[in-house]
Amino acid sequence: MAVKCFINPKCESPLVKALTDGLCTEFDRKGTVIFQNRRNVIKSFVLADGQTLVVKRFRVKGWLNTCLRMFARSKARKAYENGLLLERAGIGTPAPVACVEQWNGRVPVCSYYVCAFTPDITIQPLLEGERPDERMVDAFAALMAHMHEQGIVHHDLNLSNVLYREENGTYRLSVIDINRVTMKKRGELTLSDSKDDFMRFTGRLDVFLAVAYSYARLRGWDAERFVRKQTVKKIRHDAQWTRRKKIHHFFHHGFC
């Protein structure tokens, strides 16, 4: 097995190197599980100096994904490089520390993204509670507007991928799950380019409308006209998503 490792020069230390050197052999038996599904596992690791780091393992499964990953950056490499990009753009994200790629010859096996631990929590309860928190509506709209003005699209900006903390009465937001982030030159990003962020962050129309109005005002656009157009697109998008979900469920469970 061959291993490639990239460490952020700002974070380089013997302890970080020891962690990254041992991930491929020790990830399964060390650390504390934070999240796990069929494809990925996220764990926290406490270093000897008390520093806590978070590691997400991306497995490469299926022959098609394996072939694609032979010629493309791993998901961990994308997350690491996107983390550096977001930091340079002034967009909050847990500090990128390192990425590790494991190869069997020319065949990718898995990759690991290492970042700083954050105690921040998801904004979802504040926006999708009984009534959307107005300050969080504006804070989230401001984050999305700032990203898009910088030419950056997250592509998986559901509310569980946006974290916050409160400082002196102000919400400070950051984004996670950043391996799909893309960037264009500032000023070149069109509304069509950013549709993934706008259509997918919530399934609730009242939350969508509140954020859309705030976003349009921040961008200096005609809010009424913008919201009318985006609402039609949102309703169409959600209907298509519901149909796809039903078809997926039928083919996976309908013959049982």
Image (cartoon, rainbow, N blue to C red):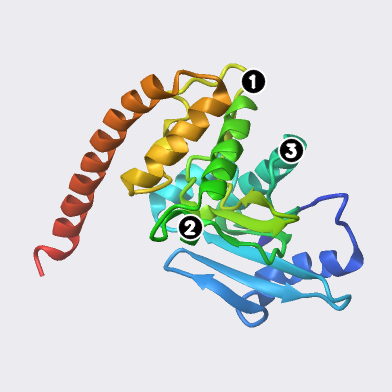
| Residue where numbered disc 1 is placed | 185
User: Secondary structure beneath disc 2?
Assistant: helix
Q: Residue 14 at what x, y percent from top left?
A: 90, 66
Relative vertical location of residue 44 with respect to residue 199 in this rendering, above or below: below
Find residue 164 and report its image quarter: bottom right
Q: Which residue is mark 3?
A: 90
Dot 1 amino acid type: Lys
In terms of sequence position, does the residue under pointer 2 or pointer 3 come before the other?
3
Mark 3: which secondary structure? loop
List x then y, in percent, for residue 244: 22, 46
What's the amino acid at mark 2? Gln
The answer to whether the residue labelled 2 contacts the one labelled 3, judged by CB atoms less than 8 Å apart, is no
Q: Please, what is the three-letter code of the amino acid marked with disc 3?
A: Gly
Density class for disc 3 (Cα within 10 Å; few <14, some 14-19, many ≥20) is: few
Q: Are marks 3 and 1 in contact (CB under 8 Å)?
A: no
Percent across and percent down for residue 43 are 62, 72
Secondary structure at badge 1 equals: loop
Closest to the observer: 2 or 44?
A: 44
Tell me which residue sits at (59%, 37%) in the image. Answer: 142
Q: Nearer the viewer, mark 3 or mark 1?
A: 3
Marks 3 and 1 sit apart, C-alpha to C-alpha, by 15 Å
Q: Is residue 90 above or below residue 108?
A: above
Q: Residue at x 47, y 45 (%)?
A: 156
State the separation of the CA atoms marked 2 and 3. Answer: 22 Å
Mark 2, residues whose alpha carbon is within 10 Å: few (<14), some, or many (≥20)?
Answer: some
Disc 2 marks which residue? 124
The numbered mark, 2 or 1, whose residue comes first in the sequence reads 2
Q: Nearer the viewer, mark 2 or mark 3?
A: 2
Which quadrant does the N terminus fall into? bottom right
Assign the C terminus to one quadrant of the image.
Answer: bottom left
Q: Nearer the viewer, residue 34 or 171?
A: 171
Q: Nearer the viewer, mark 2 or mark 1?
A: 2
